[in-house]
Amino acid sequence: MMVRQSCTILGVFALLGIALIVFSIYPCLLAQLALALAILSAPFVAALVLGSLAYRFWIWRDRRRVIERMRQFVLPASVLAVCAILALSGLPRRIAFWASLRSFQSARQSLQRSGDTGGRRKLNRRIGAWKVGHYAIDPRGGVFFQTGVGSALGPDGMHWGFAYRPNPEGCPFGAAGYALSKMAPDWYSFSVSDDHY
């Protein structure tokens, strides 16, 4: 019974870790998850506090059993911690981008040959691991592919994606909180808010 329960706990924690890695590849999903967690956190914290108090009063009498129960959580917690560190490092997203780089290069060359520099345009096409909703060729420099859109509690929207040789001043998808992160030579991931757009 104890072995089956340990395997179940390990499986649940491994699935949570895999979910963290998947969410790190798609930052718009991570933003939506964070919003949902913020909304649900108060009842969750209350249930956790009440559950831990009940557990402490009900089970704490037998210390050996408590130590054995805690040991079965060491490996699952370690697996989850490793997955969280991977997700925070951005490594899964970089690997997914490297696997999709050839597709992005091909799309960029095709769009640049069209000569269009008139702001953002609808694309709705799968490029590599991402569905690109819009693209833009910025006259200031850069070819931008929007792979995700999300919003916080206010009316402002967040945009995520990848850019080829982006300019440091701004992005066609917004102006506030513009951030770049190098993914490959000449390629960057970007995030920007459209509240000053």
Image: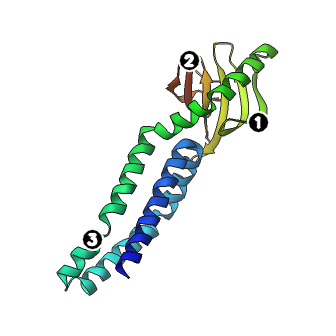
User: Label 3, on which residue?
Assistant: 70
Image height check: is 159 above or below 70? above
What percent of the width, then of the height, locates residue 99?
59, 33
- The residue located at (68%, 17%) in the rendering is 138
For the point 72% across and 23% down, the residue is: 106
Badge 1 or badge 2: first in the primary sequence: 1
- Near mark 3 (Cα within 10 A), the count class, few <14, some 14-19 or many ≥20, is few
Nearest the camera: 178 or 30? 30
Q: CA distance from mark 3 to mark 1?
A: 48 Å
Q: Residues within 10 Å of mark 2 (few under 14, many from 20)?
A: few
Residue corresponding to mark 1: 125
Picture quarter with the C terminus: top right
Q: Work out whether residue 115 can be spotted.
A: no
Please give left or right for residue 195 compared with residue 91 in the image: right
Secondary structure at numbered mark 2? loop
| First reached walking from the N terminus: tag 2 or tag 3 | 3
Residue receiving disc 2: 186
> In the rendering, at what x and y percent does residue 92 appear?
50, 40
